[in-house]
Every structure is written in structure tokens, then in C-alpha cells.
Image (spheres, rainbow, N blue to C red):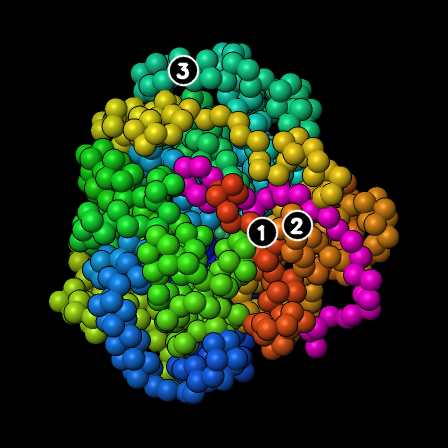
């Protein structure tokens, strides 16, 4: 009997904890936290610990499937992965010959670290229509930071004295590593400011808790800037020496007083003022990234307000503040690997959505390029893959209508497209009209159920891993492969190589295995992947601070651009401002009569990552959260005749509705409800909605009731309003239905 312990990287979620996996006779015996891990010691959650159940689950895909019946009818023929790749490549060639490479799109998610490979493939193919769910999470956030101070910041939790959690609530089962960093800082006595529409897992221990209406974050952030400037709490020396646009900023925030913000957010003015003072005077302070500001139609300017706060309080690149760390010198970066320079200027212009939303475009990437090159040595700095990305809703529209041109193929990898972007109907209509839909997943997700070809992916327990935090911080680590993948699974990264080789890119994909490709990337370190993953494990150079004193900031002026020259050149407001959310009751008072409540989507569930189907079909996890639950205040529920556990409809202004189980809780405000994200029912194949099987996707997926038209998109980036939308809630009258989950 052979028994080994391996150092493995979990990528069920995007925090990528290093874990210890015991393997006996080629099978996983245990998955445990790793106390000796240099980056994420003792960090594990229930999702990572249960991963062996996913790979051995009967729902797990092990072979390629080809559609034989109508699209979505659930009839498949098993074929070899090689045959699937050959056929897919042949179909792509034909479509490209007819409509050009831009007719091929791709979308990608967070659990597999193959984004740079997919972008390389798309760049070489000549298609600008690469996108991913980073469009609505984190990747988009990097661009306003680059425009303001030339890099994407990382909070120095270890030395900070004040943490602001802006609708961000990591927990023991949700981004465990960050939860532990925050916990350590709080145990050391760091101050805590929390903002949230509901009491969350941090608000009771916070020094200040601002209970705010959803999607009003930029209002109190602007008021913070106002207080910090007008009460003279800013870092004068830094502002004078290292920023441009302070005068314009002072003028811009003049009327954004705490009293003004209080009207909008519902939080008391004195608490807004007090929290601004605490943030500015209890330095060094951090505002860790969280998804909330990425999910507003005023996302860009909310993010800009955050960058400005970090800057004028003197928190940039200081111990305990917001580190701008640069690239690791010993590993070739993701953006180099992507070969961004190879996509031609004519093709770049065809990126879908760029006619309206320019911030995530090649034009912006070109504008940020020279300064990024000067300071960080990389022209196309796509930190966290956050450079040019096609606008997802514009992709569905091109598929559906052929406008502005036909999009005829989509490769969806590690992304349950129907669940993860808003307005499922729009996505569905687009996908149904494709000539070629390829989905690569671990399970037949609703999106996979619509595919022409489903490709079976290896799981992280079954693949070697090299993880470099998407060039966010100069750290890399190697993760060993624990066990062999079943059947004919393919490594996500290899999909792009295999297609590349078949489509004339063979010179650019010389590596026949993942290990060879990793060796190539590690050449500057003089390391092989083998040595990294079994001996060295991880590498992080010592942190140095205030590097800008030597190099300047990576912006056109070399300073922190409070007034952004890049925004100005793109025709956007160079200063942040308040924009009323598209459906606030203040903006549209008539909505208060028809749709009196406000909902937000999200509030992560402990037991799975977003729409992860193998989690929802694993008994040990699903029995803890059998149904999607709508959190609602008991007084509101009483008015609506809803008791705890009753099924209720949540209907948005789109006229669409979904069914959720009532979860009565005093934590939330009486006019706010929480709608969980990413639900479908892997245990079912049918649906109550006629004409759409898709494992009852339409029953409870939040994306069904969300909008994606331009009115609901951020002006600069085009990302979507996923929070702060109007709805009505009413009881499901025949609501005797139990859970569809059979334990
Ligand atoms: N178990 C588990 N862990 C996860 C994930 C998962 O799917 N499962 N996903 C991971 C990923 S990709 C991400 S991005 C993170 C996200 O994690 P977070 O950034 O923590 O985001 P959420 O959990 O959606 O919401 C956190 C809080 O925001 C509040 N909130 C809602 N709307 C607003 C608003 O408009 N303003 C403010 N201020 N607060 C608001 C909610 O009430 C909730 O308490 O979690 C990560 N961790
Ligand atoms: N309404 C609304 N929409 C949101 C959010 C929200 O709060 N509300 N949150 C947004 C956020 S923060 C994020 S991060 C995104 C998440 O978006 P994604 O990361 O794209 O997550 P999912 O759409 O759940 O799809 C992940 C799919 O990948 C599969 N998978 C898991 N591991 C692997 C693997 O190793 N290889 C392959 N090929 N497949 C794998 C899973 O089975 C699943 O079907 O969603 C965003 N969308
Ligand atoms: S927090 Fe959990 S799911 Fe995320 S990487 Fe760590 S162990 Fe895996
Ligand atoms: Mo996310």
C-alpha cells in the first residue's frame, strides 16, 4: 500500500488555500489544513475539505459528450475528447472563414487558473471577444486603481490599525484565509468600520456600523472625502507632493456632506462623520476589496472614491496600508503569457460593447501602457486579467440579433454562464442562437445542458498547479497533483493549447504538458515546477514600501491622479460623483407603490462557490442549505403573511419572478430583502417552466430577475446593477411544496 502526503492548492474558490492531501493507493484519503504553509497557514473551509466527494460523485463528468437531439433536449453521445476537439476546431475554422475570428467568443470563471491561456488563444486567434466573470468581480476593480495610482492595491492586514469592511464579510467558510487575516488584525486591536444593509457577521464587533441602503455606497464615501478634506484630516505632505487634482476634488465634494449622504443612505450623519474621522486618523488603515462596489451601476465612480480615500489619507504603499507591490521578478507574468501585443489594432476595435463602455477596452489598456511600462516594466498590465474584456450583455445581443455583427460560437469554460451573468433570458436567447456552444465543466451545469459539446475538466485535486495571484501580488506557489483524473478529463489550460495547435497556433504552444509550460514560466527563477511544488513550495520577495519615491506612480503624470487624465481622455468624468441607482425609490417614487421592497443578490453561502453544482449535489453540504433562502425582516414578512420557511415569489420590475424560501431575520432592514445567488437544482432535470429543462434553473436563479440593459449598466465599464433593485414579494399560494432535495 502506498501512502503519501501532498501539498495541493485548492481552487474551489479564488482564495487558493494551500492544503495537505493524503493519498493512499491513488485515492484521496483526507484533505486537511496545512499549518506549515507559508502563505495560507491553517486555512481550510468545508468546501475544500469535502472536495474528494466532488471528484467521485456520480454527477461528475468524465467523458466528452456531443449533442445528438435538439439543443437542450438532453440527448448525448459519448465521444473521445480527441474527437470532440477535432470537431470543435473544424467548426471554428468554418465559422471564422465565414464571419472572421470575432465571431468566436469565450467566457471563463474563477476556479481553474487558466485565464491567461484562454486569453493567449483568443489573442492569437484574432478575437477581441474574450470575457469572464472577472467583469463583475475584482478584475474590473483593478482598472480604476491603475488609472488613479498605477497598480492594484493589496491590504497589509498584518500591520494595519483600522479595517473598513464595505459590505464585505469573509468568514470561516467564506474566503477563510482573508477571514483569518482580519481576525488576527482585530485580535491585535485594529479598529473596525462596517457598512452593510443588514447586520452581518462583523457588525456587532465593529467600532462603527453604518446600516446603509443597498447600492448607496458612493454617497457615504463621497461624504467621507468631504469630511476628511474640510476637517483637515488628510495627509497634507503626501497630497502636496504626490497628487494632482486636489483643488478640483475639494470643489467637487463641497456639497457631499454627511447630512446629504444620510438622506440617501439612511445612516445617521454623525455616524458617517465619525467613521470618516476614524478611518482618516487611525492609520495605517485598509479598505480591503469586496464585491459590493463591483455590482452597482455606479461602480466605477464608487471605486474611484475608494482609490481617492486610500490616497489622501496617506495609506498608499506604507506598512499597514495599501501595498502597491509590483511583479515578481522570477516568474513570467500572466500578461506576458497572454501575448496581448499580437491582437491587431483592427480586431481590438471590434471588441463588443466598446462603443459604449470604454474603461475595459484596448484603448484604455493602451493609455495606461506607457506609465505601466515605465514603472513596472509591463505595457499590457492586465492585473487580475482586468484589461480589455468584451461586455457580456453585448455578446448575448450579438448572438441573438447579429448586431453589430454575428457572434456564432462561444467557449464557456469554468463558468456557468446562465447563472453568473444577469438576465438569464437574454443569455439563453443568445446561446440558443449559436452555431457552436462548447462548455467545459465538472458537471452538466444548466449552461452545459445547452451545449453542442461538453468537455470534462480535471479538478484541482487532479492537476499540477502554478498560482501567481494573477499578477496582483509578487507571490507564486506550486501545488502538487494529488490523484489521476478519471476517464478522459482535460486540464482547462490544455483546452486552449489543443485548440491552438489545431488552429495554426502550434508554434506558440510548444509545451506538451502542463509541467513543461510551468517550467518555462519559472525559467527566470532558475526553478522547475517539480522543485517548486515539492521543495520550495512558494516564493515572495521581501516587501519594500513607498517605491513610488524612486519611480513615481504608474500614471501619466507619475502622481496619484485624483483628477484622472485617463478618464478625461476617454470622455468620462475625471472626478467621482453620486449617481442615483437606476431603481431607487428616490429616483422613481412610483416604484414604491408597485415594488415597495429593495433586494440585493449575493451574501455568499458557506457550502459552495456561487453556482457550483457538485456542492449542491453533495449530501453533506446540501443538507445544511437545502433551499435558496430569502432573508426578510419579520415585520415585513408579517405584513405579507409569510412565516419562516414559506415559499415566496420575488418579482422584479422585469416582470419575472423566482421562488425562494422565507428566512425571517431581524438582521435586515424592513424594506430590504436578500436574494441568494447562483441557484439551480442538480437533482432535477425538468422544470416548471415549459420549454426549458435545465435543472429547474428558472425556478430560483437570481439572474432570472436581473436586468442587463444599458440603463442598468455602469457608464464607464458596463458592469451590472446586482444590488439595490426594486421588487415585490408575495406568498406562493399553493406553497405546500417541500424541498426538491432528497437526502
Ligand atoms: N463560501 C463561499 N465563500 C465565498 C464565495 C462563495 O461563493 N462561497 N465567493 C467568493 C467570492 S468570488 C467573492 S467576490 C466574495 C464576496 O464576498 P463579499 O464581498 O463578502 O460579498 P457578499 O457575501 O455577497 O456580501 C457581503 C455583505 O454585503 C452586504 N451587501 C449587500 N449589498 C450591499 C450594498 O449595496 N452595500 C453594502 N455596503 N453592503 C451590501 C450583504 O448584506 C452581505 O452581508 O466571497 C468569496 N467567498
Ligand atoms: N447576480 C449575481 N451575479 C453574480 C454575483 C452576485 O453576487 N450576484 N457574483 C459574481 C461574482 S463575485 C463572481 S466571482 C462570479 C462567479 O462566477 P464563476 O466563477 O464563473 O462561477 P459559476 O458561474 O458559478 O460557474 C463556475 C462553473 O465552473 C465549474 N467548475 C468548477 N471547477 C472547475 C474547473 O476546475 N474547471 C472547469 N472547467 N469547471 C469548473 C463549476 O461546476 C461551475 O459550473 O459570479 C458573479 N455573478
Ligand atoms: S477558502 Fe475553502 S474553497 Fe476557498 S480555497 Fe480555501 S479551502 Fe478552498
Ligand atoms: Mo467574486
The residues colored magenta run: 714-743
> What secondary structure characterizes most of the magenta part?
loop
Residue in the image at 58% along x and 17% along y: 257
- Helix, strand or loop at label 3? It is helix
Q: Quadrant of residue 275?
A: top right
Q: Is residue 56 left or right of residue 8?
A: right
Q: Is residue 141 above or below residue 172?
A: above
**Residue 38, percent across and down?**
39, 53
Q: Is residue 684 above or below residue 159?
A: below
Residue in the image at 44% along x and 43% along y: 718
* Residue wearing tag 2: 652
* Residue wearing tag 1: 706
Question: How packed is label 2: few (under 14 Cα within 10 Å), some, or many (20 or more)?
Answer: many
Give the camera-side residue of 281 and 509. Answer: 509
Residue in the image at 34% along x and 52% along y: 404
Q: Is residue 265 above or below residue 37?
A: above
Say whether disc 3 or disc 2 marks the residue closer to the N-terminus. Answer: 3
Which quadrant would the N terminus be assigned to in this image? bottom left
Say whether disc 2 or disc 1 marks the residue closer to the N-terminus. Answer: 2
- Helix, strand or loop at label 2? It is strand
Amino acid at each position: 500500500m502506498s501512502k503519501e502526503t501532498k501539498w495541493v492548492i485548492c481552487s474551489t474558490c479564488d482564495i487558493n488555500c494551500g492544503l495537505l492531501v493524503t493519498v493512499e493507493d491513488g485515492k484521496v484519503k483526507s484533505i486537511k489544513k496545512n499549518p506549515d504553509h507559508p502563505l495560507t497557514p491553517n486555512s481550510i473551509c468545508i468546501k475544500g475539505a469535502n472536495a474528494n466527494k466532488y471528484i467521485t460523485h456520480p454527477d461528475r463528468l468524465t467523458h466528452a459528450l456531443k449533442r445528438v437531439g435538439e439543443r437542450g433536449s438532453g440527448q448525448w453521445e459519448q465521444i473521445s475528447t480527441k474527437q470532440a476537439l477535432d470537431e470543435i476546431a473544424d467548426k471554428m475554422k468554418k465559422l471564422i472563414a465565414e464571419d472572421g475570428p470575432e465571431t468566436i467568443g469565450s467566457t471563463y470563471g474563477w476556479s481553474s487558473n487558466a485565464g491567461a491561456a484562454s486569453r493567449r488563444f483568443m489573442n492569437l486567434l484574432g478575437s477581441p471577444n474574450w470575457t469572464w466573470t472577472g467583469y463583475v468581480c475584482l478584475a474590473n476593480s483593478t482598472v480604476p486603481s491603475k488609472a488613479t495610482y498605477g497598480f492594484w492595491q493589496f491590504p497589509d492586514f498584518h500591520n494595519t490599525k483600522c479595517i473598513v469592511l464595505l459590505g464585505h464579510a469573509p468568514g470561516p467558510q467564506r474566503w477563510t484565509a482573508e477571514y483569518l487575516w482580519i481576525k488576527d488584525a482585530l485580535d491585535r486591536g485594529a479598529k473596525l468600520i462596517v457598512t452593510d444593509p443588514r447586520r452581518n457577521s462583523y457588525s456587532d464587533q465593529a467600532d462603527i456600523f453604518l446600516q446603509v441602503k443597498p447600492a448607496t455606497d458612493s454617497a457615504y464615501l463621497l461624504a467621507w472625502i468631504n469630511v476628511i478634506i474640510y476637517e483637515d484630516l488628510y495627509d497634507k505632505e503626501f497630497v502636496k507632493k504626490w497628487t494632482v487634482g486636489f483643488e478640483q476634488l475639494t470643489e467637487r465634494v463641497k456639497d457631499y456632506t454627511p447630512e446629504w449622504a444620510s438622506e440617501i443612505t439612511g445612516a445617521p450623519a454623525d455616524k458617517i462623520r465619525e467613521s470618516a474621522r476614524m478611518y482618516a486618523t487611525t492609520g495605517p488603515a485598509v479598505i480591503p476589496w469586496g464585491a459590493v462596489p463591483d455590482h452597482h451601476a455606479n461602480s466605477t465612480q464608487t471605486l474611484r472614491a475608494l482609490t481617492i480615500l486610500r490616497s489622501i489619507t496617506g495609506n498608499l504603499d506604507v506598512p499597514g496600508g495599501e501595498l502597491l507591490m509590483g511583479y515578481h521578478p522570477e516568474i513570467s507574468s500572466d500578461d506576458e503569457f497572454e501575448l496581448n501585443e499580437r491582437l491587431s489594432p483592427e480586431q481590438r476595435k471590434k471588441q463588443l460593447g466598446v462603443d459604449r463602455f470604454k474603461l475595459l477596452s484596448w484603448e484604455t489598456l493602451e493609455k495606461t501602457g506607457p506609465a505601466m511600462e515605465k514603472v513596472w516594466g509591463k505595457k499590457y498590465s492586465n492585473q487580475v486579467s482586468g484589461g480589455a474584456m468584451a461586455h457580456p450583455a453585448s455578446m448575448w445581443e450579438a448572438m441573438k440579433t447579429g448586431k453589430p455583427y454575428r457572434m456564432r460560437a462561444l467557449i464557456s469554460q469554468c463558468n456557468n454562464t446562465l447563472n453568473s451573468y444577469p438576465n438569464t433570458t437574454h443569455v439563453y436567447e443568445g446561446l440558443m442562437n449559436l452555431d457552436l456552444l462548447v462548455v467545459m465543466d465538472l458537471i452538466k451545469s444548466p449552461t452545459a445542458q445547452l451545449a453542442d459539446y461538453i468537455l470534462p475538466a480535471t479538478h484541482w485535486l487532479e492537476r499540477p498547479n502554478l498560482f501567481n495571484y494573477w499578477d496582483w501580488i509578487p507571490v507564486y506557489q506550486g501545488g502538487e497533483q494529488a490523484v489521476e483524473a478519471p476517464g478522459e478529463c482535460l486540464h482547462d489550460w490544455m483546452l486552449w493549447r489543443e485548440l491552438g495547435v489545431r488552429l495554426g497556433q502550434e508554434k506558440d504552444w510548444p509545451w506538451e504538458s502542463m509541467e513543461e509550460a510551468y517550467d518555462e514560466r519559472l525559467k527566470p527563477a532558475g526553478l522547475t515546477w517539480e522543485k517548486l511544488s515539492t521543495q520550495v513550495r512558494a516564493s515572495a520577495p521581501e516587501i519594500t514600501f513607498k517605491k513610488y519615491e524612486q519611480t513615481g506612480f504608474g500614471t501619466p503624470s507619475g502622481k496619484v491622479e485624483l483628477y484622472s487624465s485617463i478618464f478625461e481622455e476617454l470622455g468620462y468624468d475625471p472626478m467621482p460623483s453620486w449617481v442615483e441607482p437606476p431603481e431607487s425609490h428616490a429616483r422613481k417614487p412610483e416604484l414604491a407603490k408597485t415594488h415597495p421592497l429593495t433586494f440585493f443578490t449575493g451574501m455568499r453561502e458557506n457550502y459552495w462557490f456561487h453556482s457550483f453544482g457538485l456542492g449542491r449535489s453533495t449530501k453533506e453540504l446540501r443538507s445544511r442549505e437545502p433551499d435558496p433562502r430569502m432573508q426578510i425582516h419579520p415585520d415585513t414578512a408579517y405584513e405579507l403573511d409569510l412565516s419562516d420557511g414559506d415559499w415566496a415569489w420575488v418579482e422584479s420590475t422585469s416582470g419575472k419572478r423566482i421562488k425562494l424560501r422565507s428566512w425571517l431575520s431581524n438582521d435586515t432592514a424592513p424594506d430590504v430583502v436578500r436574494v441568494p445567488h447562483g441557484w439551480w437544482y442538480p437533482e432535477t432535470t425538468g422544470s416548471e417552466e415549459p420549454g426549458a429543462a435545465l435543472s429547474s434553473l428558472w425556478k430560483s436563479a437570481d439572474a432570472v430577475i436581473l436586468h442587463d440593459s444599458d440603463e442598468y449598466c455602469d457608464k464607464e465599464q458596463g458592469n451590472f446593477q446586482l444590488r439595490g433593485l426594486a421588487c415585490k414579494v408575495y406568498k406562493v399560494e399553493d406553497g405546500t411544496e417541500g424541498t426538491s432535495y432528497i437526502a
